[in-house]
Amino acid sequence: MEGKGRSRHALATLLENPLPGAPLMADPVSNLAQPEGATGCLVLADSTVIWGVGFGAEGDAVGEVCFNTAMTGYQEVLTDPSYAAQIVTFTFPHIGNVGANDEDVEGKVDAAIGCIVREPVTPHSNFRAEHEFAEWLAGQGKIGLSGVDTRALTRRIRTGGAPNAVIAHSADGVFDIPSLLKRAQEWPGLEGMDLAQRVSRSKHEWWEGGPWTLGQGYGRASKVAPKHVVAIDYGSKDNIFRNLVKAGAKVTVVPARTDVFEILALEPDGIFLSNGPGDPAATGEYAVPTIRALLERDLPIFGICLGHQLLALAAGASTIKMHQGHRGANHPVKRLEDGVVEITSMNHGFAVDSDTLPDSVEPTHVSLFDGSNCGIALKDKRAFGVQYHPEASPGPQDSFYLFERFVGMLG
C-alpha cells in the first residue's frame, strides 16, 4: 500500500516489483511496463495504460470513464441504466465489502460496463448480502479493476475531462494493448449517442412494486389508485416508480419510442419522463416531438435527469456536454423559491444550458458546486423537471416532496 509521503520513484518500484499481497497502483500520468501480477488494465484513448488486478467478468469493454463520489450504493450505481457505456471510478476506497443482493438492483438492462476501485474486494460483511461482490459482478457481465490509484485517476478526469477507454480483465494477464488502444481511440464517445433505446423496455408494463421495508422486501402497488401516471422509459431506475406509488399513483411504463397516440390511449392523468443515458439531443430527435404533443394537451409532466433535459429541449432550451459531469450522493442543490438547500444524488454528464432557457421557462434549482441548472418549471404549463435523483434518498428525504407535488397535480 502506498505509504504517506511515498515518492513517485518508490511508487514505480512497487508497480514493477509488487510486495506480496500489496495492491497494484497505477499513476495515470505514467506509462509503466506491465507489473507482475497485473490481470487487468484500463487503456485510455490518449495511450495511457493503467494496470491493476481484474475481478468480475473477464473480457474487455469500451466506454467513457467517469467517477462517483458516493460512499454507499455501489450496486445501485452499477445497475442504474443512466450509466450505460460508462466505466465508473469509485472514489471511496472500500467498494464491495457489503456484498450484493437481489433487492438493490435498479434496472435489469445494460448499465455501467465496469468499475475501478482502490482496494482489493474483500468478503462481504453485511447481513443483507446474498452474493459476493466479485461473483455478482461476473454474473452481471461487468468488469472490475482493483489496485488503482483512484485519487490520481479522478484528478486526471477533473483536469482533462472524462476520457474514452477500454477496461480489460484476463486471468492469465495477457493483453493485446495496441488492439485495445485502437478500440478506445475509434469509439465515438457519448456526445451525439442515443442510448435510451438500448436500455428502454420493449413493451408496455404495469408497475407492480411498492416501497421497500426491512425484512419484508418490496410492497405491491395498488391497481385501484385513483391517479394514473404513464412513465416513458428512457433508461429508468426502478425506485422512481416505487416513489410514485408511495405518493399515491399507479404507474404504466412504456418504451422510449412510444407514439403519443398510444400514450393518450392509456388515459393518463400525468406523464413522467425518466432518467437515462446518452446525449439528450440525440434522444430528443424522437422524444421531443412526443413531449411537445403532450404539453399541448396540458397534461402534468415531471422529468428526472434525462427526462428533465428532454423537457427543457421540448420547451426550446439546449443541452451541453459537461467537462466531468456530476456523479455522487452528496451534491448540494439550492431551491430558488425559498433558498432551501437539498442534499441530492446526481448522475449526469450532460446538462441544460441555463443561457438558452426561454422566457417561458423558470429555473427552479441550481447546483451549489458549479451553478449549473438543476431544475426548471414551465410557466404556462403544469410541467417541471429536476436534474438530480430524488428517489435515491441521499438526504434521505429532502426531495420526496417532488413526487408528492407531481401526484398532487393529477386530476
Image: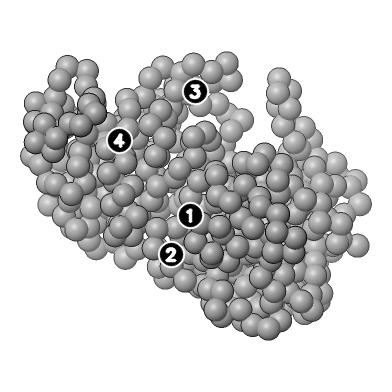
The residue lying toward the viewer, choosing from 9 and 221, is: 9
**Is residue 120 positioned above or below 107 on the image?**
above
At label 4, the amino acid type is Leu
What is the number of callouts on the image?
4
**Is residue 192 positioned above or below 70 on the image?**
below
Name which residue lies at 86% across and 61% down.
Answer: 410
- The local crowd at label 3, few if under 14, some if 14 to 19, many if 20 or more residues have their Cα within 10 Å, is many
Q: CA distance from mark 4 to mark 1?
A: 22 Å
Which of the image's four quarters has the N terminus? top left
Mark identifier at residue 145: 4
Q: Nearer the viewer, mark 1 or mark 3?
A: 1
- Check contact, mark 4 vs mark 1: CB within 8 A: no
At label 3, the amino acid type is Val
The residue lying toward the viewer, choosing from 387 and 249, is: 387
Name which residue lies at 19% across and 42% down.
Answer: 27
- Residue at image mark 3: 98
Residue 341, percent from left and from top = 66, 52
- Residue at image mark 1: 326
Q: Nearer the viewer, mark 2 or mark 4?
A: 2
Residue 176, percent from left and from top = 13, 45
- The local crowd at label 4, few if under 14, some if 14 to 19, many if 20 or more residues have their Cα within 10 Å, is many
Q: Secondary structure at mark 4?
A: strand
Q: Nearer the viewer, mark 2 or mark 3?
A: 2
- Residue at image mark 2: 322
- Check contact, mark 2 vs mark 1: CB within 8 A: yes
Q: CA distance from mark 1 to mark 3?
A: 25 Å
Left or right, residue 86 beside residue 151: right
The residue lying toward the viewer, choosing from 330 and 178, is: 330
Q: Is residue 210 at all visible to an observer of this figure?
A: yes
